[in-house]
Image: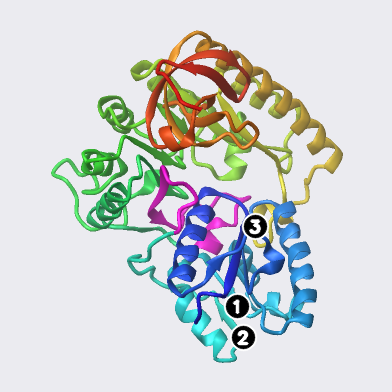
């Protein structure tokens, strides 16, 4: 392999996919590939795919069509499909796009080099069989020089009736606390200042690891992990995602309040504000249980930011049930909600139910929810006006080269005047002068050079 070969990765979907892409980029660069900003100039194209929403899946096929045509003109082009669509479709992808060289599920991200060696030997490879994920010793190519993802648990054992994740990402597999801490220490040594612990269901961390406490708890939990990694020198901030209301505990909330590096930001999807819909989704909690979690968070951390995910138009959802979702949004006052209209996914129970709603009804409900989300976010933003916030500087503002951008502890994107060469990775006190629903602008309380 020579250094002249170039690669391009396009990532669809969640933070887990972004973390996997960083790892695969690291492997490719170890193999001698160089990043290409322009996909049509790359010698290896990798699509890390998402199957949670149908539009993301269809976009993949659109992209693949263009690259398949390109490969007909350049047989040396290598095309890889990784991630959840790859796991779901398997060999069917090859039948649909015969120009593909490698189809690989998410659990094979760490084995990309071995799989490509088979491809370069002239084989067309499908790697989607369930495996145990071996400890990752690859060096990710991080998209940021300041913040980094750290996987702590792979897979998911939940069986939500709308979700394909368990079938495409496999069963839960927790990494050991020692391996996680070692990765964080390595990131700190490279100059990273913030880490986000990642899991499809991060509150389930450790329940597949051996051991229990005298009180009967699992020996390893997310709460214990936060205490274990909190004192890594050089790391200023710790976040985690994604949480599940079924497993979210007061013990975890107390730990977040006690540990100064853990940011006051929680991402806890509620999906629906109606108990009957939640039951049909097999989410395992009620609207009341979700509200108790929010109340506990605000008891310990009154100013905490709370974001969530919500689905509208689930099969059988009535207008009254949808109104319960709107009511929950109004009552809680979320800082951000990722919203989506229900999309039937292959192999999920809800996809074959007869009481599917029309696309017109789903679109109307999504539009109404989005209006409320923007209104609520704007109201929540008002609390920042005139306040001094600590911002971790991550990058230059791509729309204004005189500004840098970073995030508050509450995860609100913030812009202010400054030079990235001077401020990257710095914690800067910023007086907020302008508030918007999802971002802020301010003035640094330091002298900055432009």
Classify 10 Å Cα crowding around label 3: few (below 14), some (14-19), many (20 and above). Answer: many
Residue tagged 3: 51
Residue furthest left as drawn: 214
Provide the secondary structure element on which disc 3 rests.
loop
Residue tagged 1: 102
Q: Kindly report the distance in space between the C-alpha atoms of the residues bearing marks 1 and 2.
A: 6 Å
Colour scheme employed for the rendering of this structure: rainbow
What residue is rendered at 50% in x and 51% in y? 143
Residue tagged 2: 124
| Range of magenta residues | 141-169
Q: Seen in the image, is 358 located left or right of residue 232?
A: right
Based on the picture, tell me whether residue 124 belongs to the magenta stretch: no
Q: Position of residue 105 (x, y in %)?
A: 54, 69
What residue is rendered at 44% in x and 32% in y? 393
User: Which quadrant of the figure has residue 146?
Assistant: top left
Mark yes or no: residue 389 visible: yes
Q: Is disc 1 in contact with disc 2, using a CB cutoff of under 8 Å? A: yes
Q: Kindly report the distance in space between the C-alpha atoms of the residues bearing marks 3 and 2.
A: 23 Å
Q: Seen in the image, is 99 located left or right of residue 337?
A: right
Q: Position of residue 366 (x, y in %)?
A: 75, 33
Compare marks 3 and 1 and give the one earlier in the sequence. 3
Provide the secondary structure element on which disc 1 rests.
strand
Name the mark nearer the viewer: 3 or 1: 1
Name the mark nearer the viewer: 3 or 2: 2
Q: Position of residue 10 (x, y in %)?
A: 63, 59
What residue is rendered at 59% in x and 91% in y? 122
């Amino acid at each position: 392999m020579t250094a002249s070969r170039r690669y391009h990765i396009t990532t669809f979907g969640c933070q887990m996919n972004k973390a996997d892409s960083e790892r695969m980029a690291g492997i490719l660069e170890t193999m001698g590939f160089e990043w290409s900003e322009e996909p049509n100039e790359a010698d290896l194209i990798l699509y890390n795919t998402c199957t949670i929403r149908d539009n993301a899946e269809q976009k993949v096929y659109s992209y693949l069509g263009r690259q398949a045509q390109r490969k007909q003109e350049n047989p040396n082009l290598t095309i890889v499909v990784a991630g959840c669509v790859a796991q779901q479709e398997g060999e069917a992808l090859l039948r649909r796009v015969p120009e593909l060289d490698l189809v690989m599920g998410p659990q094979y991200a760490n084995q990309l080099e071995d799989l490509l060696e088979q491809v370069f030997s002239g084989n067309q490879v499908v790697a989607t069989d369930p495996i145990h994920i071996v400890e990752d010793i690859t060096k990710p190519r991080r998209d940021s020089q300041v913040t980094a993802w750290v996987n702590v648990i792979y897979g998911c054992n939940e069986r939500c009736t709308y979700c394909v994740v368990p079938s495409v990402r496999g069963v839960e597999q927790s990494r050991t606390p020692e391996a996680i801490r070692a990765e964080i220490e390595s990131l700190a040594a490279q100059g990273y200042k913030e880490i986000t612990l990642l899991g499809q269901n991060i509150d389930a961390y450790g329940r597949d690891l051996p051991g229990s406490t005298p009180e009967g708890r699992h020996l390893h939990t997310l709460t214990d992990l936060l205490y274990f990694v909190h004192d890594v020198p050089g790391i200023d901030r710790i976040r985690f995602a994604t949480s599940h209301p079924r497993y979210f505990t007061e013990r975890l909330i107390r730990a977040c309040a006690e540990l100064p590096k853990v940011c006051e930001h929680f991402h806890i999807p509620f999906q629906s504000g109606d108990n009957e819909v939640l039951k049909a989704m097999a989410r395992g909690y009620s609207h009341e249980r979700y509200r108790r979690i929010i109340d506990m968070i605000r008891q310990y951390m009154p100013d905490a930011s709370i974001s969530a995910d919500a689905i509208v138009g689930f099969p059988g959802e009535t207008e009254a049930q949808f109104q319960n979702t709107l009511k929950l949004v109004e009552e809680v006052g979320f800082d951000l909600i990722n919203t989506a209209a229900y999309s039937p996914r292959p192999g999920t129970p809800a996809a074959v139910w007869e009481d599917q709603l029309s696309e017109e009804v789903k679109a109307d409900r999504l539009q109404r929810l989005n209006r409320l989300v923007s209104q609520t976010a704007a109201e929540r933003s008002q609390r920042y006006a005139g306040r001094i916030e600590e911002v971790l500087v991550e990058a230059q503002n791509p729309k204004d080269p005189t500004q840098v951008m970073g995030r508050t502890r509450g995860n609100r994107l913030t812009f202010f005047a400054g030079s990235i060469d001077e401020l990257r990775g710095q914690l800067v006190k910023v007086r907020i002068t302008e508030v918007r629903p999802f971002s802020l602008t301010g003035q640094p309380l330091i002298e900055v050079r432009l």
